Amino acid sequence: GQNIDQPTEMTATEGAIVQINCTYQTSGFNGLFWYQQHAGEAPTFLSYNVLDGLEEKGRFSSFLSRSKGYSYLLLKELQMKDSASYLCAVRPNTDKLIFGTGTRLQVFP
Amino acid sequence: DSGVTQTPKHLITATGQRVTLRCSPRSGDLSVYWYQQSLDQGLQFLIQYYNGEERAKGNILERFSAQQFPDLHSELNLSSLELGDSALYFCASSGAGGVETQYFGPGTRLLVL
């Protein structure tokens, strides 16, 4: 079967660093994606990993370990606007994405 | 703005009715994906079309169907609607072969009363 796990909720303080973990078990692997979704809005693409290691993009970084079935999204210098759900998604083949249920992050002043 | 457009933004209808949701992909994208997101649930993949042909199917109910037209826009048809079909329906598109990143439209919020 296909299974993607991530924490349901996290809280953090403005200016801090937060790490959102994602573990996955899928029948194949052809890339892992992180999306940000504000309530009632469309998911927006944040990052993509297909090889092991860290991908950095401004305040956001994403890490992948294929042997461990593990990824994390690191958000630095948190801002209030970062309060949103963060979705981990795996592409098991060349087509569909399998999404986790998302991690709701609340940033407090 | 992702470049993917969806209409309508909101739809309110009654049980037993039929509705059609429309999606236009980003310019140049050949693949269109449909997802359903119910309250407090993750995005569930429904179906994918590539250049007019069905490419992959997820947990799509038999009451639901989709198609992609020669101009690459896609429609998702939902029939015999039930209360549980109330959800956000998102369309996403990606480049050739579905290898590239999927970009999502703003969604259609469907409420079945």
Image: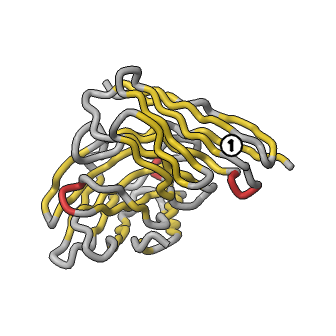
Please name whichever residue, A48 or B14, is drawn nearer the observer in this view of the structure: A48
In the image, residue A11 lies at what x, y percent?
A: 75, 38
Q: How is the image coloured?
A: secondary structure
Q: Secondary structure at mark 1?
A: strand
Quick one: label 1, few (<14), some, or many (20+) residues within 10 Å? some
Answer left or right for B8 relative to A90. Answer: right
**Residue at 54%, 45% in the rendered image:** A61
Amino acid type of the residue that numbered disc 1 sits on in the rendered structure: Leu
Among the 4 quarters of the image, the one containing residue A79: bottom right
Among the 4 quarters of the image, the one containing residue A16: top right
Residue under circle 1? A105
Please name whichever residue, A62 or A9, is drawn nearer the observer in this view of the structure: A62
Position of B42 relative to A29 (above/below): below
Please name whichever residue, B85 or A82, is drawn nearer the observer in this view of the structure: A82
Outermost top residue:
A68
**Residue at 26%, 27% in the rendered image:** A27
**Residue at 39%, 40% in the rendered image:** A32
* Quarter placement of the N terminus of chain A: top left
